[in-house]
Image: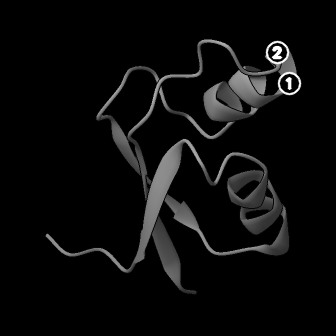
Amino acid sequence: MAKLRIKWVRSGIGYEESQRRTIRALGLRRLQHEVVREDSPTIRGMVHKVRHLVSVSSGEEG
């Protein structure tokens, strides 16, 4: 199955609590942290909710 590489690039300060919880639910712990997740509709929806705080690329480059 395809993978998504998700990187937290912008602070959640000043945004809704639900968006900060979504960042944590994706497995991101601190700024500039990257995680690789399976590409699924659930993960895509979470990324869409915080798209202004993260950057996303496909695959596992390295």
In the rendered image, residue 16, in percent from the top left (x then y), is placed at: 82, 20
Q: Nearer the viewer, residue 4 or 11?
A: 11
Q: Above or below — where is 21 with respect to 26?
A: above
* Quadrant in the picture for the N terminus: bottom right
Which residue appears farthest toward the front when viewing the image? 14
* Quadrant in the picture for the C terminus: bottom left
In the rendered image, residue 5, in percent from the top left (x then y), is placed at: 41, 63
Which residue appears farthest toward the bottom when viewing the image? 1
- Identify the residue shown where x is 46% and y is 65%: 56
In the rendered image, residue 61, in percent from the top left (x then y), is placed at: 20, 75
In the rendered image, residue 38, in percent from the top left (x then y), is placed at: 59, 69
What kind of element bears circle 1? helix
Residue at mark 1: 18
Q: Quadrant of residue 8?
A: top left
In-image side of 30 versus 42 (left or right): left
Residue at mark 2: 17
- Identify the residue shown where x is 30% and y is 74%: 60
Q: Dots 2 and 1: beta carbons under 8 Å?
A: yes
Q: Quadrant of residue 9?
A: top left
In-image side of 44 versus 51 (left or right): right
Residue 10 circle label: none
- Identify the residue shown where x is 70% and y is 22%: 20
Q: Above or below — where is 21 with respect to 52?
A: above
Q: Quadrant of residue 43?
A: bottom right
In-image side of 26 versus 2 (left or right): right
